[in-house]
Image: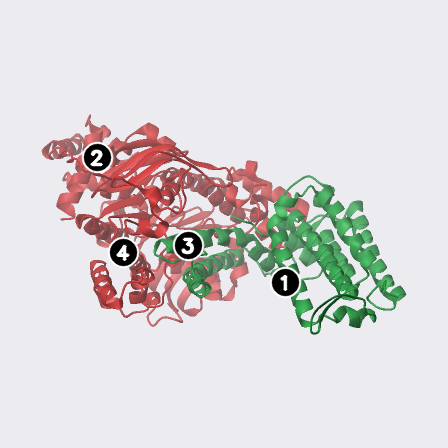
Amino acid sequence: MINIFNYIDRPSPIHRLTGATKLVCLLLWSFAAMLTYDTRMLILLPILSFVMFYISRIKLRDVSFMLGFTAVFMVLNNVLVFAFSPQHGVELYGSKHVLLGLWGNYVLTKEQLFYHLNLVLKYLSTIPIVLLFVCTTNPSEFAASLNRIGVKYTVAYSVALALRYIPDIQREYHDISQAQQARGIEMSRKESLSKRLKSASAILIPLILSSMDRIETISNAMELRGFGKNKKRTWYMGRKFSKLDILAMAFCALLLAISLSLNVINGSRFWNPFI
Amino acid sequence: MEPIIRFENFGFKYNAQQKPTLYDINLSIHKGEKLLIAGPSGCGKSTLAHCINGLIPSSYRGEMTGSLTIAGKETRDMGLFDISRRVGTVLQDSDGQFIGLTVAEDIAFALENDCVAQPEMKERVLKAAKLVDISGHLGHAPNELSGGQKQRVALAGVMVDDVEVLLFDEPLANLDPATGKQAVELIDQIQKETGAAVIIIEHRLEDVLHRHVDRVVLMGEGRIIADMSPDELLSSSLLRDSGIREPLYITALKYAGVEIRADMAPASLETIKLGEKDKEKLRSWFSSRPETPAEGERPPLLEARDISFAYDNGHQALKDVSLTVYQGELMAIAGTNGAGKSTFSKLACGFEIQQRGSLSFKGRDLMELSIKERADHIGYVMQNPNQMISKVMIYDEVALGLRTRGLLEEEIGPRVEEALKICGLWPFRNWPVSALSFGQKKRVTIASILVLKPEMIILDEPTAGQDYRHYTEIMEFLRELNARGITVVMITHDMHLMLEYAGRAVVFSGGRVIADASSAAILTDGDVIRRASLKETSLYPLALMCGIEDARAFVQRFIDYEREAVRR
């Protein structure tokens, strides 16, 4: 079975950072990547994130499923952009170098290709770092770190709890689907899509019903032990910031600063090699 | 001394219900007392527990009458958090109540909510963990723990606060027999060390009475029927009348014509005083019963030969397992969690495919058949009916398997009717499933499997969480099905179920079959009992105590007698 949200415990400096640090870094990094289309920056960020991956000792195959999943999205995104606005690059960069005439309005230009390159680089700048966050952040610390950056602890805990139950629910889905297959509910690729969607309901309804039972139990258990009593709470797993934490946050803040100043220098979010 | 908990003319009605669930409750519980609250499902014992721990009225709304005080204060003025400082609750579902991601965090949960500083928190967590002997597992995640260990964590989680009352809601429901026995011993030890009042809600009387209990409160239909010492209760007929199972040794003594009196200290086999006359009565009952006739030979139905199976994560779940299920039998597969019993049934149904060995059904290799095709021969019923039911109406739910097989409605009608009639659900055919009780839902799932006309059905823990009456109802129904020629295989660790209903039991341990014999033989075999985390039936030491040498035969004759004479 594939685990989507999977904390992988390995000894590394990245793992030693507190959850709050990693969350702050993730946010800073994402802004840095999102705010600019400067290709030089967008090349730097993926390289840095691969270095991070190396340091963290997380292997490519640990995250292969999610990488594949996002790759599909990336391809789809590119195809759609080209299909709906094949001249987007020309509009952005203000010049037109035709490489290949295709059909009617569909002309392949250098500008468009360059724009797509940037789009791909954007994915590469953000996705690996999100995966890294998921793989190296102990779920126990996740709620504490959300709380630390100002999210209400009741909300933070619910998010963490939802993440924690994902493997359980996956397991239950698996069991239910097996039992339903025996009754003739076909989930294999042999069936048509509409039939498979219908079959999915035969699995989802029992899954939802049994999850409701689970929610009642857990919420009773939490209330009985004083959850929600005070405005604040302490955390067993909470940790103080170390030098490394400060360093990491400073580094990510620097990245954001570079990204912002590039926007100012370029006069726009785009870096234009065509002029 | 002022009681810690006092009910006075207390009553409660849920807003969603027309009639009250509790009437005229008068009950006082003192510090240091140990109380067992017993009663059949729906008698109001869970509602009573919710009143004590404060979930009523804070989470379940309703109307309270009379008075309920904890340490002299009315609970309706206290609020849930005040109450939870005094009353620690260990819920039935030790898995579902595990909140933290690791043992330490779970134990710390109440302290975190109380804003206790980290150094003090760590100290108190360690102390509580030591008390329940789980301190070696502080960093473990819930899926690395056994059911018994999870319960210890839950207990430690309420012990971190110095509670005055410990409330256990069906603590034995999800535990195997040996672990259940340890749980009862642990509760006893904790009570002695802390001096807290302990309230245990449980219908498995014999198991709780393994250790001393001061009083048993028997409930029925929302009222307290009896509030007396276990010795007094066992010498009355109140248990039988209210549908609670007596300890088996008491039943055996009653069959033999021994009169049970409170002064015999019948609460436990360790304390009971039997006179020479009583022992003689049991011996003569034993010799008056006929020997068990040998079973006739049956043809094999499902044959497994040297099966091995490992999951993707490398866990070797089965190793060289060979076993045969014979046509028309009613048998049990027992073993602890992870022993391989569920994996075996998954292989039989085709949900997983063995890496080595062969499985055949009536001589035909099952590898040739898909999951769907196998289901026409072997039906599988999951433990929790809510995991199987996907339609709103009962009729549609039962017809589902036939519709997916492309049968015409004209053919489906009579087959659904037959299945519903067998399961006693025909009057409800146009009802929504949600209107049914748990036991009835179980029948719906069985009907939805029977409609495919399998020769054999496998049931995962068919009676889990059921009280004696519902247990008997489900099991008698399975016996009827068996009498119709359907082979029934039950996966269970319920020893009563094995003893009373299964002729034969196969025991798994560590992925291997370690025993394959009559249930009576297995539940009197010390080595198998130990390895499979079962418990010896109390009939066995009773027989030895009374000087019956062939104690195993005594157990067998007791079962035979129950089957013929008592249940008719």
**Label 1's element?**
helix
- Chain B: give its colour: red
Q: Are marks 4 and 3 in contact (CB under 8 Å)?
A: no
Q: Residue furthest bottom?
A: A104
Q: Which chain is green?
A: A
User: Numbered disc 4: what chain?
Assistant: B
Mark pair 1, 3: CA separation: 32 Å
Of all chains, the one bearing label 2 is: B
Residue denoted by label 3: A176
The kind of residue on which mark 3 rests is Ile
| Residue B368 found in image quarter | top left
Position of residue B501 in the picture relative to residue A211 (left or right): left
Asked if the residues shown at circle 1 and circle 2 are in contact, with their CB atoms under 8 angstroms apart, the answer is no
Front residue of B119/A267: it is: A267
Q: CA distance from mark 3 to mark 2?
A: 39 Å
Name the residue that disc number 1 marks: A76
What colouring method underlies this structural image?
A: by chain
Residue at mark 2: B555
Q: Position of residue A226 (x, y in %)?
A: 56, 57
